[in-house]
Image (tube, rainbow, N blue to C red):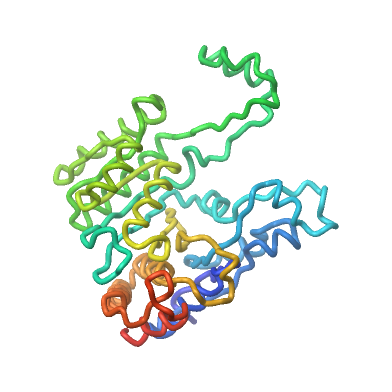
Amino acid sequence: MAKYKIAWLPGDGVGKDVMEAAKIVLDTLKLDAEYIHGDIGWEFWVNEGNPLPDRTIEMMKKTDCALFGAITSKPKDEAQKELKPELQGKGYVYSSPIVRLRQLFDLAVNMRPCKAYKGNPLNYRDNIDLVIFRENTEGMYAGVEFYPVKKDLKEAMLKYNKKMEKFMDIPEEDLAISTRIMTKKGCERIIRAAFSFAKKNGRKSVTLVEKPNVLRETGGLITKIAREIAKEYPDIELWETNIDAMCMWLVKNPEKYSVLVAENLFGDIISDLSAQLVGGLGFASSANIGENYAVFEPTHGSAPKYAGQYKVNPMAMLLTVKLMLEYLKEEEMARKLENSIAKVIEEGKVRTYDMGGNNSTLEVAEEVARNL
């Protein structure tokens, strides 16, 4: 019996391509694992009205973690039009599978390392080593939205906040509301995860990225909690900055920052910005971690126009495999994999098109495997 059971979720588009690359490296590492395929992606939405079938969820519950490729997502109206005819008008509503997985398995911590590897021609600078901790289940992505906004809802909101007065006469169809929901538990988990990582890895600062001067209640809550938790880590400095200023400082002085922590939307923004500083989404890995389960995914999309061409950079996926190995406590394998990735990048002999080369996705994976 294999030591690990890993849910294998290729998805669609280039997700399938980069997962093939991952398998090349995992087979070379000889990880003692059983990989169990799971149906997920756009084709299952089109044909079944569910991009994350229940059978996949049940399978995942019997595994140690999941490795996920990429999936296509489209706006609600476009998604409805692509359902096969017999499913049209049946009440099916598209929702993002990865967001649903984060909610179902309570994967509260999203960790996104953004490291500049020597020799990468796409680096903004060579001394960038950022790790972003993004709260994964609450904030602006909690999914509690309203449209149209009914009169009784407006009246209920007015009862608790007089600022609602100026919206009372707006017609129902002309108003939409998104809520930013943050709990003490959610804030504590993500802040503590950031500080724990910093302590374990010898990092000297944690930067909270927020906007408490405008978002006074939600921003105020997470700021208060961060200050309290920081007292438990006297060797680690807590820095506080607003999201808009953080974007400027990341462009100006990215090397000054180490661990960044933010709620869902702000974390999404700064992690994509940070990824571009170290070569783009082709180098952006991520881990969605809960108390009992984790899903690992590169942060790039499915890029349907490149599907099956084996053109895209697999480094994001291979760095994601590294994160999975660390989660499984296979630290030596993780170290070997990162060293091999770094060597291939520095040598520059085998590169995909985005790095100025003409090698395929699988050729890059094979070169990484050879260096193992």
Quarter of the picture containing the C terminus is bottom left
Residue 25: tell me if it is visible. Answer: no
Q: Which residue, as the protein is rendered here, is positioned at the far bottom?
A: 370
Q: Which residue, as the protein is rendered here, is positioned at the far left?
A: 235
Q: Residue at x 43, y 81 (%)?
A: 359
Q: Percent from the top left, x then y, of residue 228?
A: 26, 34
Q: Percent from the top left, x then y, of residue 153?
A: 64, 21
Q: Percent from the top left, x then y, of residue 110?
A: 41, 52
Residue 215: tell me if it is visible. Answer: yes
Residue nearer the viewer, 237 or 356: 356
**Residue 108 against residue 287 in the figure, above or below:** above
**Residue 93 against residue 311 in the figure, above or below:** above
Q: Residue at x 37, y 31 (%)?
A: 219
Q: Residue at x 43, y 73 (%)?
A: 353
Q: Which of the 4 image quadrants contains residue 338?
A: bottom left
Q: Which of the 4 image quadrants contains residue 247?
A: top left
Q: Which residue, as the protein is rendered here, is positioned at the far front?
A: 356
Residue nearer the viewer, 188 or 22: 22
Q: Which of the 4 image quadrants contains residue 187?
A: top left
Side of 264 where 332 appears, left or right: left
Q: How many marks?
A: 0
Q: Residue at x 30, y 78 (%)?
A: 348
Side of 3 where 256 appears, left or right: left
Side of 331 where 82 appears, left or right: right
Q: Percent from the top left, x then y, of residue 166?
A: 57, 14
